[in-house]
Image (cartoon, rainbow, N blue to C red):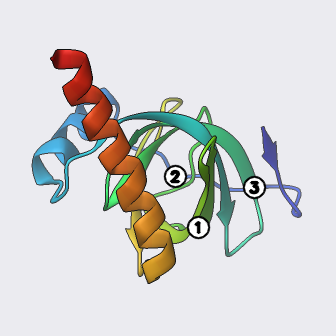
Amino acid sequence: MLTTGKKTTQKTTIGGPRRAKKYVKERAVKRLPFVASIEVVDVGTGTKLVARTSEIGLGGCYVDALTPFGIGTAVAVKISRDQGSFHAKARVVYTDATFGMGLKFDGLDSEQRLVLENWVADIVLADRSAKS
């Protein structure tokens, strides 16, 4: 779902599935499978996108979206799941037209970083338990 305070919103999308794979190699922090609700707001236009995540890590997340924001867009995110919510500023670092966008979290405060670290630890522990 896409809502905007303006009538038109320009979006820049490039790449395709190969572009996302390229960033896996360049990513400094590993991302893990993680499905949760996410609200992404373009801080410049107020455009709000409600979608879901498919991956998360300490450095960012991937958002499944049919209409991703353009590369470089500054956004505010709220990720919600059973154990609470996570809020952060981020920016779009890559997009896949009609698939989604990769976000990099910017300047997490200590409280939000702790929420994120706990979620990632839960995922890692659940994965280890499943493999045992």
Indicate which disc, 3 or 1, sits on the residue closer to the N terminus.
3
Indicate which disc, 2 or 1, sits on the residue closer to the N terminus.
2
Q: Nearer the viewer, residue 93 or 114?
A: 114
Residue 125 pos. (x, y %): 27, 37
Q: In the rendered view, tell whether residue 35 sits above or below residue 42.
A: above
Quadrant of the drawing holding the N terminus: top right
Q: Quadrant of residue 60?
A: bottom left
Seen at 39% across and 55% down, the residue is 118
Q: CA distance from mark 2 to mark 3?
A: 16 Å
Q: CA distance from mark 3 to mark 1?
A: 9 Å
Circle 3 residues within 10 Å: few <14, some 14–19, many ≥20: some
Q: In the rendered view, tell whether residue 9 sits above or below residue 46.
A: above
Q: Nearer the viewer, residue 63 or 87?
A: 87
Using the image, tell me which numbered label, if any, was put on residue 106. Answer: none
State the residue position of label 2: 12
Kind of residue at disc 3: Lys
Element at badge 3?
Answer: strand
Indicate which disc, 2 or 3, sits on the residue closer to the N terminus.
2
Left or right position of 21 against 79: left
Quadrant of the drawing holding the C terminus: top left
Kind of residue at disc 2: Thr
Left or right position of 127 against 61: left
Q: Nearer the viewer, mark 2 or mark 3?
A: 3
State the residue position of label 3: 48
Q: Nearer the viewer, residue 38 or 70?
A: 38
Q: Are dots 3 and 1 in contact, CB under 8 Å? A: no
Left or right position of 51 against 6: left
Element at badge 2?
Answer: loop
Element at badge 1?
Answer: strand
